[in-house]
Image (cartoon, helix red, strand yellow):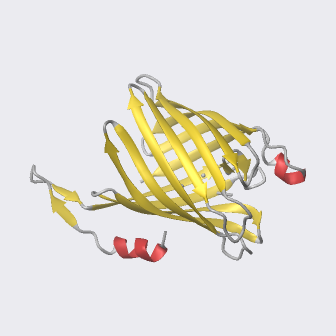
Amino acid sequence: MRGHIINILLAGALLLPSVARAQDGAETPAVSIAYNAALVSDYRFRGISYTTRHPAVQVGADLTTRSGWFLGTWWTNVSDYGTSNLEIDLYGGYGGSVAGFDYSATLYTYVYPGGVNTDYYELQGTIARTIGPVTSTLTLAYTPNQWNTDRDNLYVALGSDVALGQLPLTASFSVGRENGSYDHKWDWSAGLTYKLDALDLSATYVDSNYKGALEAGKNARAGVVLSAKASF
């Protein structure tokens, strides 16, 4: 199950590029839009490959407001999932900062066009804190019992990004635990990202303790994921 609301709302917001004037006289947009595109050697989500360890092309768009509300969408190819080969994530929520902590609350909807009993939604919250070169993030994702599952699912993860001095390099580490759709599954990862202007190049080791039968178990084995992601 799936990692991060309504396309019509997103499109509508794109048609309303309102701006507000800041105190220093410069115009600050009330709404900002960012895009991203990536090529990855394997699409891994919480330790499991959803492209049967094959490459994926991924694109996304995020709309954020000065008040903290945001909307977004993210697309990727997947291997046969309920007869669908496409995943579309739609999400929206609110984020902010308090007492040195950054937080967000997000509703995700996962859509698989043409799939049979595949779509579902998830509630996700994050809390992050930066101390020196280290940013740590706690993530909780809850998926209620829905039409395509027979029980609730809870995923808890802790990740850290470490800036490596003056170099454009960031080391990332994470560990997560999932129970519900998977019984007490653990996943972990460690990687390096090199930033070159708007391009992020990364290599990440990913593994889990999941030992499912046949193809499912193979997709959870250890592997290295290479990624090139552009943001603009």
Quarter where residue 56 is shown: bottom right
Q: Can residue 62 be seen in this view?
A: no
Q: Residue furthest right?
A: 214
**Horizontal and vertical percent for residue 77?**
67, 62
Question: Residue sitting at 45 percent across and 77 percent down?
Answer: 8
Residue drawn at (42%, 51%) of the image? 104
Residue 109 in the image: state x and y as whole percent: 56, 66
Asked whether 11 or 122 is in front, the reply is 122
Report how many numbered discs are placed on residues in the image: 0
Q: Indicate whether 25 appears above or below 9.
A: above
Q: Quadrant of the C terminus?
A: bottom left
Residue at (48, 72) in percent of width and height: 6
Q: Position of residue 166 (x, y in %)?
A: 40, 24
Instruction: In this rendered view, identify the residue nearer to me: 22 or 184.
Output: 184
Look at the image and tell me whether residue 26 can be seen. yes
Image position of 230 (left or right of 29) = right
Identify the residue shown where x is 62% and y is 57%: 57
Q: Which of 159 and 167 is in front in this view?
A: 159
Q: In this rendering, would 93 be left or right of 59?
A: left
Q: Position of residue 124 (x, y in %)?
A: 52, 54
Q: In this view, does 116 lie to the left or right of 16?
A: right
On screen, residue 144 above or below 8: above
Which quarter of the rendering shows the N terminus? bottom right
